[in-house]
Image: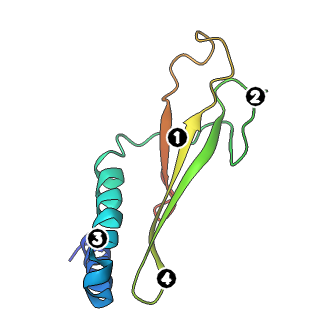
Amino acid sequence: MGKKLAKVQAFSFFCAQLGHSWSKGCTYVSTIYNIISKNKGAKVKAPDSYSWMVNIDIPGSYYKNGQYDFLDEKGNSVKQFDIYSLVNAFPAETPAGYPDVLIYDVSEDQW
């Protein structure tokens, strides 16, 4: 069984243990996980400038505007994605060629 499948199954097991009152929340979390996983796109190198704060001094900078940490039934992280957005504080032609959003797969150490 692949790691990814095992992680999703661990998450599904965790949701099942929470019972009916949590089923809608688990559906939302599962949907978020699937959306991020399916839309990661091609692997890229890390951006030259990225931070949890907006950096308007360097064109092509990214700031972290989201973190999704998926936990198993014991509260251990099984998968984490950080979402970074391009800082748009520059003239439109300056950051040409930079994607608007990057996903960093923390668990895999891969952009």
Q: Name the residue under label 2.
A: 56
- Residue 31: % across, % down: 29, 59
Q: Mark 1 points at which residue?
A: 45
Task: Specify the label residue 76 is tagged with.
Answer: 4
Lower sequence index among marks 2 and 4: 2
Lower sequence index among marks 2 and 3: 3
Task: Specify the label residue 7 is tagged with.
Answer: none
Query: Dividing the image into 4 quarters, which one contains the N terminus?
Result: bottom left
CB of mark 2 within 8 Å of CB of mark 1?
no
Left or right: 64, with 1 as reference point = right
Q: Name the residue under label 3.
A: 24
Which of the two marks, 2 or 1, is nearer to us in this view? Answer: 2
Instruction: Please state which of residues 39 and 22 is positioned toward the viewer in this rendering.
Output: 22
| C-alpha gap between disc 2 and disc 3 | 39 Å
| C-alpha gap between disc 2 and disc 1 | 21 Å
Mark 4 burial class by Cα count in 10 Å: few <14, some 14-19, many 20+: few
CB of mark 2 within 8 Å of CB of mark 3?
no
Q: Is residue 101 above or below residue 97?
A: below
| C-alpha gap between disc 1 and disc 4 | 27 Å
Which of the two marks, 2 or 3, is nearer to us in this view? Answer: 3
